[in-house]
Image: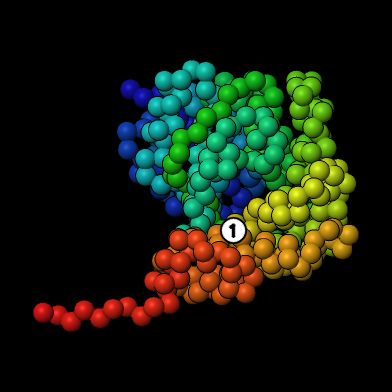
Amino acid sequence: MSPLITVIIPTYNRANYLKQAIDSLLIQQGQKLQIIVVDDGSTDHTSEIVKNFDVPNVLYKYQHNQGGGAARNNGLKYAAGKYIVFLDSDDYFLPDRFIKQRTLLDNNPHIDVVGSGHLFVNQHNKILNKIHPWESFPQLNLETILQSCPFTLPSAMIRKEVLEAVGGFDESLKIHQDTELWTRIALEGYKFAWTKEIKFAYRQHDANKGLTNGVTSRAANLYILEKAFNHKKMPPTLYQQKNKYLAWGHIKSAWREYSAEQIEEAKDDISKAVLLDTELLQDVDSLLDLILKWAGEPRSGGRIKYTQTVLKNLPSHLPVTRSHKRKALGRQAIKLLFESYPTQKSEVQQALKLLAKNDPTWFTNKGVLSITYKTLMPPIFHPSP
């Protein structure tokens, strides 16, 4: 018999999505699950949705509104599983969500947290993007977690004893609670690993777009980093790089601010980043690529639109020339080209036009030439015999 897995679903006024979230758990094959729905003071018909399931392994717990961190911690009090998984109530899991992660933890007692990738979907379940975080962060350790939250909370499986040892979630945070948790777990010496799969769908909809507010994100990012660097177990070698990590925190905050059209706040964050880490100015192309790192995220509003917004609104004191900007736009156009081909014809054509205008040297690339030929040449007509 496989070990019991507890899935905790914190929810607040998400009755319209909650049923799909629970359904996505009940269809999982060969898994012994305990499902705990923690209602954080909802005023809609959330309780009715849960009670309509009427199955013994789905528990409903109500609390007065205290926030997501408190709801998750409350769920942990009732968790009976060896392994813990969290699912936000407006998201859902794909089939066979638990098999690889559970097997990895079963067979590797030195591994404590397993992360994976995810889909971005819209409110109608249309796929917007596929995230393979292991490509950017092959190694999961304290350094990569300090740099950027490598994986989202619902894409992970965690040993219950680890969550209990570190004290659960920091309830003072409204966003980025997973980043803070991973940081604390890593500081305590626990180990992370990947399962290179996508078994979770993160839903983007109007009601959760406010979470991308850049100013709120900046405050949370800096709080998490300061808390981490004040931790008694922060390695001295990493502590010496504190300013570098703070600079990255400001750059990631700028992404949220540019996306939310908080332009002055974004420019302020970029300025603070290069003051904290002056080495960023030694390679302007790399700096621009770092600032544009999240351009392809659905929350950015479109890779090219976001890139153009950033390049038009950089701090004036940065040594960025017109040539730097054109090449940066060309590099983003290349990413758009290979992301879009062959299914999104209009995006492919947009990317090719941007390359021709901003950095035509890319047309010496065999892959780009092949896509260009197949896109622009009319199909050859083969008459029926």
* Colour pattern of the rendering: rainbow
State the image quarter where residue 151 is shown.
top right
Task: Report the residue at 59% width, 69% height from top.
Answer: 360
Coordinates of residue 271 in the picture (x, y in percent): 86, 53
State the image quarter where residue 167 is shown.
top right
Coordinates of residue 173 in the picture (x, y in percent): 74, 41
The quadrant of the rendering that contains the N terminus is top left
Within 10 Å of the Cα at label 1, are there few (<14), some (14-19), or many (20+) other Cα atoms?
some
With 57 as the anchor, is 233 left or right in this view? right
State the image quarter where residue 379 is shown.
bottom left
Q: Nearer the viewer, residue 301 or 219?
A: 301
Q: Nearer the viewer, residue 68 or 175?
A: 175
Q: Nearer the viewer, residue 316 or 108?
A: 316
Task: Report the residue at 67% width, 41% height from top.
Answer: 148
Direction top: furthest residue = 109
Task: Report the residue at 77% width, 38% height from top.
Answer: 245
With 152 as the anchor, is 48 left or right in this view? left
With 159 as the anchor, is 318 left or right in this view? right
Is residue 384 something one can see in this rendering?
A: yes
The quadrant of the rendering that contains the C terminus is bottom left
**Amino acid bearing label 1:** Gly
Helix, strand or loop for disc 1: loop
With 39 as the anchor, is 272 left or right in this view? right
Q: Is residue 345 above or below residue 254?
A: below
| Tag 1 residue | 296
